[in-house]
Amino acid sequence: MAIVLNLVARYHFPFSNFTQVAMLILLLGLGTDFSILLITEFKQQLRDGSDQLAATLAARKRAGKTILIASLTLIILFSLLGFANYSLYESLAGIAIGILVLLLVSISFTPFFLFLMGESLFWPSTNLDAHNYSRSWGFLSTKSAAHPVIALLIAIIIATPFVLLNQKHLNHNAAAEITQKYPAKAGYQIVNRHYANGMNAPVSIYIKSDHGLRNQTDLQQIETITRQLRDQKGIHSVNSATEPHGEPLKQLYVNQQLNTLTGDNDAVSSGMSDTSKKLKDTSIPTDGLDSLTGDAQSITSMVSGIQNDFNNSGVFSTPAQVVDELQQKLKSQHRRRLTRVQRIVVTEALSRALNDQQQQTQMNSALSNIGLKTDSINSTTNSFKSELQNVQNQVRGYASTLDSLNGSLTNSNNFLKALAKSSVGDTIYIPDNVINADYFKTLIGEYLSDNEKTTRIDVVLNATPGSKKSIDLVQDLENQVNYDLRGTQLKGATVATGGYSSVVADNQQIAHASFKRVAIILGIAAALILMLVAGSILQPVYLLGSLAVTYLMALGFTRWFSQQFLGQKWLTADMPFLTFMMLLAFGIDYSIYLLMKYRQTEGTGKSAGRMINAAILIGTVIIFAIVVIGVTFASLISSGVLTLIQVAIAVIFGLIIFGVVVPSIMPGLMRLTYEGFNFKQLHFKHRQTTRSQNNVDKP
């Protein structure tokens, strides 16, 4: 780990949260295997009579060759992970360094302690002949060689259900990795109980254009995309610049605007109808004017009479003339004359009378003026009456014009109402004064970049983040948006998705492609190395085929176990690859042990027989290693991390299956391919017994 971490710090060596755990588990397992192999060979040398030094050197020579080949093979395989285009897979390349260190330790420190401790290493046992071969592997391999077809059929029948349990879908939800005791998990579950499952991790769709998006055309297109996304199955809600709160802004829709307009027009139309009706009933009364004309004429007549009477009774001579006329009348009739005093008195009296005459003259003039004005009033009244009659006729004419206008307004309003109910009414229209308003800029500012050339659409899914449904939806969302932008002003815009589900979708695609690539590369490399080790083509193919079936069975069993006992329906995203590498490492290790022991087996016997002997000799080592490694992996169950728990279950089950499958089918396959098989030998026991009995009964 010190070497790896220094490489990480200085040279950006790939590293992940699984690097240390995987290295620890693999080195414990492989170290156990190498130690068991050395100790078993050391024990064999002591049993053959060698001293401690000779036994140690011989054990290191014979077992060390196997350890060297196995270590170099695994170093090559894990180093090839550096070519994987996925960070998690690349991060396991550091295990190659750990295996190199383990190799150096296994050929130096371990032999030193073998030599130092000698037979006391096996305390409290003193029987060096104990456990020198595997009875179970001997039994399985013998039966496989004797009945190869039956062994293969049994293996296929047992493997099929476990393989079928395996499914490609994986759980990418990171919340499944932690247990209930963590506050983050509790908060996650609370949100899921009260909101849509996707509320924890909404999907963000980004549309980047080469021009500003705050205009009627682009906002209308954004609204169209928003509605189409919202109407898609599996979508809970959509927030965008035109729907910042997840609901349409109804005031900006054409139908809402038309409904407001037609409602106002209906009120205007109703008012116009009432006005027209009142105008038609309009009547300007002129009776008062007729009365006024009669009164004015009566006044004029009366003034004329008053003037006539006044003129008839008026005095128009001067006082002196009156006195002189009176003096002459007295003189001619009465032969008398007025005295001076009398003349003065009469003259004074006449002067006063003359004053009264002047006042009467003024009154006469005033009456004349009244008569003239009364005549003028009479004329004006007649003219006003005529004008009022004209006005009344015009007002009634306006009612007809108003009826015509009201009809046109009603027709227009009916058209607008029909337009509001059509698909046109279900479009957004934002006037320029609204688009440029400060409150509207603030409203949509959260969904537009600073330069307003990029917009964001947040999509909340009904599916759980990281689930198969959410991943499929994310992949469809980007395709749909790109399709919707075709033929629009935004046809050249860049569309990208973000958010946890989007990251998971991208990771899944990259991981799946990288997994296939890594599996092919490692499979070919392992096959070539095993072919060199075995000096055969078919034996490595059989072993790798058995390992592949074991891997699929382990995944199927783990999925079933997780669903039944862990409450998790799916395997986690990283579990298959980690399980693949663990089983590949141990499987290749055990295969090399078996093939090396096969080549070391002396004799010229048939290949199936030699494989049986190799299985018997190496079986104890592999079985004991599987037990120790199983216990080691079982410790991962207490980690509380779902991926490690599932990896532990899969590896334990896989190693057990591999430990049963190899001795059960390898000798039989080698007999079928290397020695040939007479299918006439495939008889049921009762048929053979019957046939033998028939032969005995014949004379």
Image (cartoon, rainbow, N blue to C red):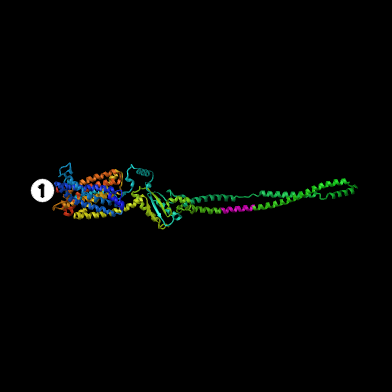
Where residue 237 appears, as percent x and y from the top left, is: 40, 48
Where residue 197 appears, as percent x and y from the top left, is: 37, 46
Outermost residue toward the left?
Answer: 699
Q: Work out whether residue 571 or residue 148 is closer to the camera in this orientation and state it.
A: 571
Magenta run includes residue 395: yes
Q: Amino acid at mark 1?
A: Val
Describe residue 85's horizontal placement relative to residue 427 as left or right.
left
- The main secondary structure of the magenta stretch is helix
Q: Is residue 66 visible?
A: yes
Magenta region, residue range: 388-402
Where residue 36 appears, as percent x and y from the top left, is: 20, 47
Q: Secondary structure at mark 1?
A: helix
Q: Work out whether residue 387 or residue 647 is closer to the camera in this orientation and state it.
A: 647
Describe residue 668's horizontal placement relative to residue 399 as left or right.
left
Residue 490 location, quadrant? bottom left
Residue position marked by numbered label 1 in the rendering? 696
Magenta run includes residue 449: no
Where residue 635 appears, as percent x and y from the top left, is: 26, 44
Q: Work out whether residue 124 or residue 141 is closer to the camera in this orientation and state it.
A: 124
Q: Is residue 165 visible?
A: no
Describe residue 98's horizontal placement relative to residue 409 as left or right.
left
Q: How many marks?
A: 1
